Amino acid sequence: MKRLIILNENLRLIFHRLIRNTKVDNLHYFRILIGSIFIGRIKNLSFLSELPHSLFRPNILNFTNLFDAWPSVLFFSSLFYLNILLGVCVIIGIKTRIAFILIGIIALIENGFLYSFGKIDHGILLNTIPFVMAFTNCGTKKALFPDKIVKSESLAIAILAIFVVFGFFTAGLEKAFVWVDFDIYSSGFLSWFYASYYSIGRTELLAPMVLHFPWWLTEIMDYTAVLFELSGIIFLLINRKIWYAYLFIACIFHLLNTLFLNIGFEIHIIIFATWLITPFLARFKALIIIFPILLFFDAVIFNLIAWLLTIGLGVYGFMNHCYWPKTERKLTNINNS
C-alpha cells in the first residue's frame, strides 16, 4: 500500500511538471496562425478516385478497409470545400472548438485513404494539432462567436509535447537498430543522402558538400541523430528551460536536414511554433502573415528561411526570457530580489 501511495505521488509530481514545463499563453493568436497555414495547405484528394482499384491496399488496422475501392470525386471534393469553410471559422473564431474537432476528423479520414498505399508519413503528427487546439481556450478571445473557457488547456498542450517526444523516440529507436552499428563502412545518414541526391535530385544548398565529408563526421552524425531523437522525454521532464532548449536543438537539427538533405520538414515548424513562436505573436503580429506565406511554398529555400526565422526567435526568446509565463517570471524576480 505504501508503495502505491509513493508511486501515485511520483506520478502526480511528473504530471504537474509536464504541465509547468509546456504551458503556453496567447493561443488565440496561434489559432489564427494555424488557421491561415491550414487553409493554404488544404489539398483536394479527388485524384485518388482516378487511381486503379488494384492500388487500394489499406493496412489491416486502417478504417478504409470498410471500403472496397476509392471513394468518388464528389466525396473528396466535399471534404475539400468543407475544410476551407472550417478553416475560415477557425481564423475568425466561429465555434472554434467544434471547427477544430471536425478538421481533425476530416484529416483522419483523408489520411486514412492517403495511407491506403501502405506508407505512413511524417505528416501524421500534424493531425494531432486540431484535436489538441480543440481542448484549449484559443477560441475564447479574438473570436466572432467565442467558445466557453475550459480548464484543459495546459493538459492539452502537455499531451502535444508528449506526442512530439514520442514521435522523435519512435524515429530514433528505428534508426538505433540500423545506424548504431560501429561500422565505419556504413552510414545511415549517407543512405538517406545518396538516395535523395542521385535519385530525387535534391542537390540544392549545401548538399554537394556532403560528397566530401570524412567518414568520421558521418559516423558522428549517425550517433548524435539517434541520441537526440531518443532523449526528448528527458529534456521534457527536467524543467521548462531545458524543454525549450530541446526544441531549439530540434530546429537546428531540421535546419541541417534542410541544408544537407534538402528535406524541409516544414510541418515540424508548425508543431514547434506552439512553444517557440506563440509567445511572440501578440508582440509581432506580422508573423501571422509571414509564416503562412513561407510555408505555402514547397521550395527548399522557403523552408530554409522559415527555419532560420524560427531559430532567430528562439535565440531572442532565451535572451529576453519570453518563454516563461508572466506569473512565473514575477515570482522569479521576487525571489532574486
Image (spheres, helix red, strand yellow):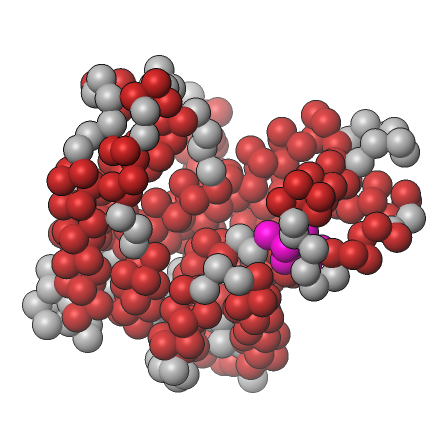
- Left or right for 118, reference 170: left
Q: Give the camera-side residue of 110 and 135.
A: 110
- For residue 53, above or below residue 311: above
Name the quarter where the C terminus is drawn: bottom right
Residue pictured at 63% horizontal, 36% vertical: 172
**Quadrant in the rendering for residue 224:** top right
**Quadrant in the rendering for residue 33:** bottom left
Residue pictured at 53% horizontal, 68% vertical: 302
Q: Is residue 150 visible?
A: no
* Image position, residue 290 (x, y; %): 42, 76
What range is drawn magenta here?
Answer: 256-263
- Left or right for 260, reference 234: right
Q: How many marks?
A: 0
Magenta highlight on residue 292: no
Residue pictured at 83% horizontal, 45% vertical: 218
Q: Give the camera-side residue of 114 and 278.
A: 114
Could you tell me what secondary structure mostly forms the magenta stretch? helix
Residue pictured at 58% horizontal, 67% vertical: 301
- For residue 35, above or below residue 54: below
Q: Residue furthest left?
A: 145
Q: Give the camera-side residue of 330 and 182.
A: 182
